[in-house]
Image: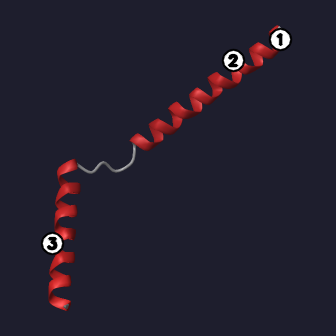
């Protein structure tokens, strides 16, 4: 391969990496929910579904 071909590939790789870093930074700025809130919501959802199944049978 010629040198210009290798340089072109390297430039594409670096620009792709920069795009991923920028995407990661944008995602980090979103709303953060603590893990215990997620677990609590899952537990409450399970209890509600089980209660509805018992009541509707």
Q: Residue placed at 20% from the left, 91% from the top? A: 56
**SS for tag 3?**
helix
Residue indicated by mark 3: 47
**For marks 2 and 3 on the same chain, the one whose residue lies earlier in the sequence:** 2
Residue 16 lies, with reference to residue 33, above or below; the image says: above
Q: Residue placed at 65% from the left, 24% from the top? A: 13
Quarter the C terminus occupies: bottom left
Q: Mark 1–mark 2 contact, CB under 8 Å?
A: no
Residue indicated by mark 2: 10
x and y percent of residue 40 in the render? 16, 59
Q: Which mark is residue 1?
A: 1
- Real-space Cα distance between discs 1 and 3? 63 Å
Residue 10 lies, with reference to residue 32, above or below; the image says: above
Q: Is 41 on the left or on the right of 13, as rendered?
A: left
Q: Residue placed at 39% from the left, 48% from the top? A: 30
x and y percent of residue 42 in the render? 22, 62
**For marks 1 and 2 on the same chain, the one whose residue lies earlier in the sequence:** 1
Q: Nearer the viewer, residue 46 or 22?
A: 46
Residue 40 lies, with reference to residue 10, above or below; the image says: below
x and y percent of residue 32 in the render? 30, 48
């Amino acid at each position: 391969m010629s040198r210009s071909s290798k340089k072109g590939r390297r430039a594409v790789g670096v620009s792709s990496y920069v795009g991923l870093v920028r995407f990661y930074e944008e995602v980090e700025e979103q709303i953060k929910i603590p893990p215990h809130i997620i677990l609590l919501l899952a537990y409450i959802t399970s209890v509600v579904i089980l209660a509805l199944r018992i009541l509707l049978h």
